[in-house]
Image: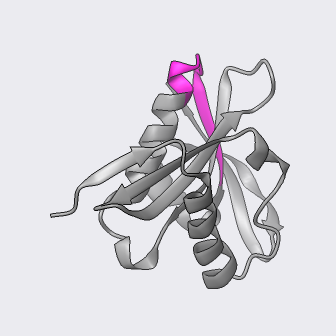
Amino acid sequence: MANFDVRYDAKDDAFAIRTKVFVEEQGYEDEFDDIDAYAEHITIFSDGEAVGCARCFPESESSRCYIVGRVATLPEFRGRGIGRMLVKECESAASRKGALSMRLHAQARLEGWYEGMGYKRVGDVDYEDEGQPHIWMEKIF
């Protein structure tokens, strides 16, 4: 049975996971952005190995809404609840900072997965991010 640990200080490990999942596996070219400088980076470790990551940040400087994104789990660790742990950890981190809601810009194919965690779709598919349709979803605490 794997032992999972959550870390907020493993940005390099999170970036390595994002590179493997979003760049190498899914073909994204513009994975990293200015938000990475101020977002909270959360990484899940299994028996000492970085296996999943996510980031969260306030929607604006004075917002009570936070954004969760870049949720990624290494392929060999999928199906073990790591993605859900990451989203819940982002929600907890945002809640501790006074957030009243969370939003995310999900790959449209993952809508049902996020709905299972209480997120509701807000609007239509609004654009394609590097060929991938995305939708905004929201959860009120």
How many discs appear? 0
For the point 29% across and 64% down, which residue is it? 80
Which residue is more in the foreground, 124 or 39?
39
Which residue is more in the foreground, 140 or 124?
140
Residue 73 in the magenta stretch? The answer is no
Give percent across and percent down for residue 140: 54, 27
Which residue is more in the foreground, 81 or 12?
12
In the rendered image, the vertical position of residue 25 relative to residue 123, given as above or below: below
Give percent across and percent down for residue 11: 61, 52
Within the image, what quadrant is residue 103 found in? top right
Q: Which residues are magenta?
A: 94-105
Within the image, what quadrant is residue 39 found in? top right
Give the quadrant of the N terminus: bottom left
In the rendered image, the vertical position of residue 114 relative to residue 79, given as above or below: above
For the point 54% across and 44% down, which residue is it? 9
Residue 103 in the magenta stretch? The answer is yes
* Residue furthest out toward the left: 1
In the rendered image, the vertical position of residue 118 relative to residue 18, given as above or below: above
In the rendered image, the vertical position of residue 80 relative to residue 95, given as above or below: below
